Image: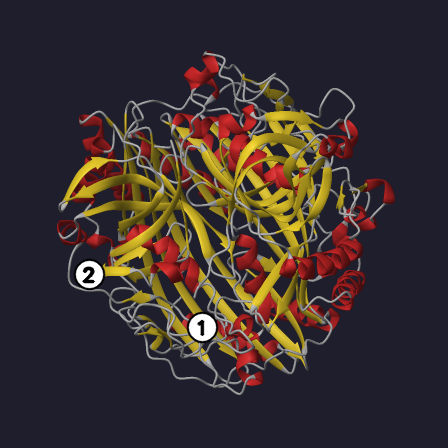
Amino acid sequence: MDRRDFLALSTFFTGAALSPSIFGKAIAASQLQDGIELAVKKRLADAALAAATAAGASYCDVRVGRYLRQFVITRERNVENIVNTESTGTGVRVIADGSWGFAATNGMTEDAVADAARQATAIAKANARTQTAPVQLAPTPGVGEVSWRTPIKKNAMEVPIADKVDLLMSVNDAALGAGASYVNSLLFLVNEQKYFASTDGSYIDQDVHRIWAPLSVTAVDTSTGKFRSRDGLSAPMGLGYEYLDGKPEDKFVLSNGHTTYGNSYDMKEDAIAAANDAQAKLKAPSVKPGKYDLVLDPDHLGLTIHESVGHPLELDRVLGYEANYAGTSFATLDKRDAAFKYGSEIVNLFADKTQVGSLGAVGYDDEGVQTKRWDLVKDGTLVDYQTIRDQAHIVGKDASDGCCYADSWSSVQFQRMANVSLAPGKTKLSPADMIAGVENGVYISGRGSFSIDQQRYNAQFGGTVFYEIKNGKLGPMIEDVAYQMRTPEFWGACSAICDESDYRMFGSFFDGKGQPSQVSAVSHGSSTTRFDGINVINTARSLG
Amino acid sequence: MSILTEAQAKAILEKVIAFSTADEASAQLSGGIQGNVRFARNDISTTGIVDDTELAVQVAFGKRVGIATINQFDDASLERVVRRAEDLAKLAPENPEFMPAVGKQTYRATDTFSEATAALTAEARARIAEASIAPCRDRKLIAAGFLEDGNTFFAHANSNGNFGYQRSTIADYTCTVRTEDGRGSGWVGSNVKDVTEFDTATDIQIAMRKAAASADAQALEPGKYTVILEPAAGAGLVSFMMGYFDARSADEGRSFLSKQGGGNKLGEQIMDPRVNIYTDPWHPEVPAMPWDSDGLPRERAMIIDSGKVANLEYSRYWASKQGKPETAGWGNIIMDGGTKSTAELIAGTERGILVTRTWYIRMVDPQTVLLTGLTRDGTFYIEDGQLRYPIKNFRFNESPVIMLNNIEELGRSVRVKADEGGSMLLPPMKIRDFTFTSLSDAV
C-alpha cells in the first residue's frame, strides 16, 4: 500500500501546527551534521546485548538510531514552513523462550537501554506462554565492525536553507508565470544514521540519505467550475542534493516535447511544463472507454510494479503474517513450485537492495544481513520471493534475502519490500520506436490514482498525463483515464520493453505496511513498456 | 516520566515560555505509553511497548517562525530547545500568512480517559490475542489480528497565558479469520476508549462465521447494486470525503465544494435530506480533545445539516482573510442514523449486497470525489431479507457525495475506525445504485 501520508504531511506543517510525535524533535540546521560518536553507540549496544543475555534471551539485536528529516514547504510566493526534525533512541529486539519481544527507549544511557533489553525479554517470555512454534532464525554471519554510506555527492542537509528557499521560489514563480492558478512545491530530505549490533557479533554503522522534490500545479477555470492538477514528474531517490542539478543527459524527451527525468531533475523546467499541462487538461477530451494498447513511462510503471509485483512477492504476505491489514498474496508457494507464468516471456523482474541511487539501497538490512540482487520472475516464470531471517526456513532457504527494515528506532523491524524492478529489453528499442508500432493506444506518464485488492489480483491505476496514440503517432492529450487489470493477465500482455538506454527509477517515499503501520521508501526501475489490450475506463462523473 | 500530572506539565511549560526572548512562544508537551500485540497464523508474531515524551516549542519574531522539540527535561535542555527554535525562526523568511498565537482560552474537559485502558498489561494483551486464536484453532480456522492501546497526556501553553491539560486513552482491536484452504475470510473490529468494553470472545465469533460462510463465493456481474455497507465499510468512504471540507480549497475553486462561477457551496443541498453529519468533542461515544492544534476550543457544530453544507473547515488565516469567525478544527465526525441494526436492515432488503469492509480506497477524481476501492472479508448476496450466498469481491468506483444522495435507509450509528482514518460514529447504510466496476478474485 502506498500511503496518503504525503497529503497528511503537507497539511500537517501548513500553518505551523505543533505536533512533535510524528517526525521527532526539530533541530537547527547547524546541528544536523553532528552524529552520535561511534564509541557511544557501541557502548549502548553492548549494554543492551549484555542485559538481554543476562535476562535469559537467546538472541538480541540493538538498533541505535538518529533519524533526521528536513522539510521546506511552499505554496505560490510563500514559504509555509521550514522544519528540521531529529529522533534519537534505541530499539532492542530479543528472542527468549522461543518468542520475540521488543522494547524501545529514547533514554541514551547504558542503564536505559539495559532496562529496555530486560523489558523486551520479559515481553518475549510472556508471549512464549501461548506460542506454539518457536522462532527459527536463518543464520547470518557476524561481520564485526563495518560501515556503509549512501554514495551521495552533495549532502542535502549541508546545503544552506536560503538556497533551498530560492530554488522553490523560482520553481513557483516559473509555474505561476506559465499560467498556473496555484502551485505547491516541497523539498523533503532524509538522513538515517543507523547503528546495528547483535549477539551474532555484528556492529554495523550506516549513513543513509534520500531526497524528494515534489510539486503540484493546479489550473482552475472558474467559469466552468473545472479544476485540474498536474504533479511533478520527479522521483524520490537515494541520492544527495546533486539530484536537483538537472543535467541534460538525464532528460527523456518524447516527440511532442513531453519530458521525464532520470538520475537528475530540472524542477523549474518541469514546473513550467506542469503549468502548461494543467491548463491543457482543462480542455482535453475525455477518453472513450475500451481496450487499448498501453505505453507506460517508467515514472508511471514503477507504481504498477510496486503494487502488482513487489507486494505479492513479499514472503510474509504469502505466508499470512499480513492477513489482517495489508493482506495476503495470490502468488502462493504452490504457484512457485509449479513454475507459475507471472507474465510473458520477456518479463524479468528482480529485487535489488544494492542499486545505486535507489531508495532501498543499504549495505546491510535492519537485522544485519548483507544486501544483494536476486531474481523474482525469470523469463515470465515466478521463481522466488523476498524474505527475512525468521521466515527463510519456511520456504527451505538457508539465508535471509536482507529485506528487514524498521522506520524508526522505536519501531520493530520486519519484512519490507526491496527495490523491485523490470529488467530492460535485450534488443534495441526506443520509446519512439515502440509508439510507432501502436495502432490504438494510450501513453501514460506519472503516478495517479492507485488501488489493488488484498491479494494483489485486481488493480486500477490512473496517471498524471495521458496522450492518445493513433496509427503509430502520439496524438492529443486526453483525460479521465484509468486502467483496470488482473495481475497475471496484465503482465502476460507485456509485448515490448525498451532497452537499457531508457531505463530509470520511480520511487515511493511512503510505502505503508504493518501494524502499527510503518513507512518505507523503495525504488522501481524500468524502461518504457507496452501492454496490449488493456481495459481502460472513463472516470468522469457529474455531481449534478 | 511519560505520564506527567497537570502540575508537572504546567511547571515545565511555564519554564519554557519564560526562557523565550521571541515576540511570542507556544509549547506543547505530550507523552504516552503505546502497547501492542500482533498475531498471525494462530500465533503471536510481534509485540511491543514504546514509551516516549516530547516537548515542542514554537517561537515567532514578527512573522518568522521556528519550531524545535526535545525529549530531555532538565533546565539546560529546556533552555536549549527554546534557543534552537529561535535560531530556526531567524533563518526562516517572513510568512505573510502567519497568525499570532491564540489568547487565553477556556476549555470544557471531555471524557477521553479510562483507567482500565491505562492499566492494560502485556499479559492482558496476550490474553486478548489468545481469546482470538484459541477458538479459531479449535475450528481449524486461521486468525491474524492486532490490538493496540495508548495511554497519553497532552498539555500546551503560550506566552499569552493560555494553558490546557488532558489525558486520553484508546484501544483498537481488529481480527481477520481465514479458512485453512484460503477460500473464506471474515473480519471484525472494535475501537473503544475503555478496554472493559472489549468482548473478544463474542467478536471473534462474527469473524469466524463470516470466514466459514464466505467460501464458495459466486461471481455476480459488475454493475449498480443496492448495498448495505456495514459501518466499518462505510467509514472508509465517508472519512475520506470528510478530509476535503477545507474552506480555502473550496473558495479557490479546487474542491468538490467549489461553486461554478466562484465561491463555495456553503448552504447548498448536496446530499439526501436524511444526512446529518456533525462534530462534537463531548460526544460520550467518540469524545475528542477539547482543543485543536492551534489551541482553539472545539465546539459542537453541524457539518451537513439535512443534506445541506452547514460548515467548512477554516484555518485561522483563511477565516481572518474571509472575515469569518475563528473556529477550531474538527476533532471527530458523527453521522446520525436510525434505530435499526445491520441485521434489521438486511431483513428489510429484497435484493442487495452486504459489504463487511472496504479496502484500499483512493481518490480517482477530486472534482467529484470519485473514489475507487474494493470490498473485502465478507461480501454476501441478500435476497428476501436473508443472506443467501457469498459473492466474489468487487472493485467500486463511487463518489460518497453521490452515494449519500442514494440513501434507502440508515441504521443505528456505532463507533468505528476506518482503516486509514480515526474513530468516528457512523450508521450502517442501505444505498441504491452503488457502482461496482469489476470483479476481484481476492479472498
Q: Residue at x 28, y 45 (%)?
A: B356
Query: Residue B421 versus residue A63: which sits nearer the camera?
Result: B421
Mark 2 and mark 1 in contact (Cβ < 8 Å)?
Answer: no
Report if residue A523 is visible in the image: no
Chain for numbered disc 2: B
What kind of element bears circle 2? loop
B184 on left or right of A192: left
Label 1 vs 2, first from the N-terminus? 1
Q: Quadrant of residue B394?
A: top left
- Single out the residue that lies furthest toward the right: A248
* Amino acid found under the numbered disc labelled 1: Gly
Q: Nearer the viewer, mark 1 or mark 2?
A: 2
A519 on left or right of A213: left
Chain for numbered disc 1: B
Q: Quadrant of residue A205?
A: top right
Task: Name the spot of residue A496 as percent of width and height, x first.
Answer: 67, 25
Name the mark on residue B412.
2
Task: Name the spot of residue A242 as percent of width and height, x first.
Answer: 81, 47
Query: Residue A418 versus residue B50: which sits nearer the camera?
Result: A418
Q: Residues within 10 Å of mark 2 (few under 14, many from 20)?
A: some
How far apart are the two marked residues, 1 and 2, measured between alpha carbons? 26 Å
For the C terminus of chain B, the quadrant is top left
Query: Residue A29 versus residue B386: which sits nearer the camera?
Result: B386
Q: On the image, numbered disc 1 is attached to which residue?
A: B329
Task: Name the spot of residue A32 as percent of width and height, x first.
Answer: 71, 54
